[in-house]
Image (cartoon, rainbow, N blue to C red):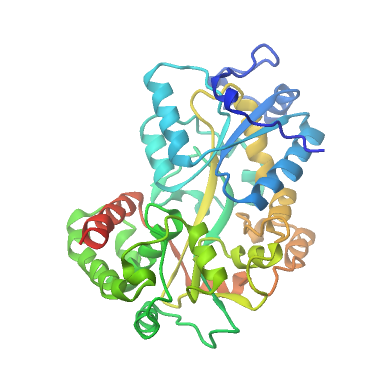
Amino acid sequence: MKRTLVIIALYFTMTAPTGLYAQTADADLAKTPFSRIEEQARGSQVSWYMFGGWAHVNTWVDTYVAGEMKTRYDIDLVRVPMDAGVFVNKLLNEKAAGKKKGNIDLLWINGENFKNAREAGLLFGPFAQKLPNVQQVVDPDSIAFDFGFPVDGYEAPYGRAQFVFEYDTAQIAEPPTTMAALKQWIHANPGRFTYPQPPDFTGSAFIRQVFYAVTGGHAQYLAGWDPDLFARKAPLLWQWLNDVEPYLWQKGRTYPQDSAFLDTLFSRGEVGLGMSYHPPHAQNKIIEGTYPETVRTFVMQDGSIYNIHFTAIPFNSPNKSGAMVLANFLISVDAQLSKYRPENWGDFPALDPKRLSPQDKRRFQAVDLGPATLGPEQLNPVAVPEIPADYLEAIEQGWRDHVLNE
């Protein structure tokens, strides 16, 4: 039986229960032993707002995570599906209205949404360094920045993603593995390629990857937003995208509204290449029967963007102790291992292998990722960090101005 509570529309008009558990004042949580935080979270309810568009991820949260939280901590987990931009706006409205107690305890967030939330004072922290699992099995340097923006302990790591492309080996013998080769492939195969329209996460990431490839690489952008640099470099991106547009699916007159629509086009064979920011995506689709078993993934040899995704706690969370316990469990070896298995999700761990025990290392190495998923030995050599969030926003706006409406 699922332990997660059913979410209905009335939920959003309800206030989280009070008086069920004693909460330590926010200012004192940093000085409170984590064992005490676990104690006061027992018997409570934690509401986790997260992207709800992946059925297999929802199932993993509703079964494994909810079950473990109940068994280990007597915490009832409520998963609330909501896009990050929506819950950031919700928190902005609550902040403006002076609402000191909301109904969100934990967020699945990163990138520009984290930057916007942090700058608007919507997040509680710092808290991440307080979590025992962050201290023990996470490399602090790997979580210092989120899309170039300092984390400063206001997020706890949750998983690692990297951009991959997909092709059907029954249809394509050798896929293009550089952006220059991809451009040639698109021209040679009109109508067989497209990408989701930004601000879709996958489509936006594809454009950023093109930006790196055609402007001389990622290193020049990591120092932070430079409007003069962007003004010099961005026309190379618009040129590449406009050069391929007439050769895209539907001759570039329209773009898929989201990555799910692109998945459908790829599964039908209407386009020859798919893409995802999640390395196990193709294997997940094979498991569910949506993709042929002959589908495989590949990466661009001139760079494959990666990022760490995180959890964060809102400023007005009614159960910050419970949120910290959940965030700590999600970065535990057990949870990361369960999440890594493709039959559950396949999301890559955000742990430092050097900090794992030999036994735990063997547990991760024993996971069968499936034939469609590239392993760390193939992904790591081409991994490049995400661009600072200010560039992301400028690229998305520029795409609308110089590509979509050109």
Residue 61 appears anywhere in the view: yes
Position of 148 compared to 21: left or right? left
- Residue closest to the far bottom: 173
Residue 37 placement: quadrant: top right
User: Residue shown at 38%/61% (left/top)?
Assistant: 255
User: Residue shown at 44%/29% (left/top)?
Assistant: 90
Position of 277 compared to 386: left or right? right
Q: Looking at the figure, which quarter contains the N terminus?
A: top right
Q: Is residue 198 above or below residue 240?
A: above
Position of 19 compared to 109: left or right? right
User: Residue shown at 35%/66% (left/top)?
Assistant: 218
**Residue 72: where, in percent of width, then height?**
80, 35
Residue 48 placement: quadrant: top right
**Residue 358: where, in percent of width, then height?**
77, 62
**Residue 291: where, in percent of width, then height?**
63, 69
Q: Is residue 320 above or below residue 233?
A: above
Nearer the observer, 135 or 375 = 375
Q: How many marks?
A: 0
Nearer the observer, 280 or 142 = 280
Residue 47 placement: quadrant: top right
Q: Is residue 106 above or below residue 195?
A: above
Q: Looking at the figure, which quarter contains the C terminus?
A: bottom left
User: Residue shown at 42%/55% (left/top)?
Assistant: 257
Nearer the observer, 138 or 178 = 178
**Residue 357: where, in percent of width, then height?**
75, 58
Q: Is residue 7 above or below residue 298?
A: above
Residue 224 appears anywhere in the view: no
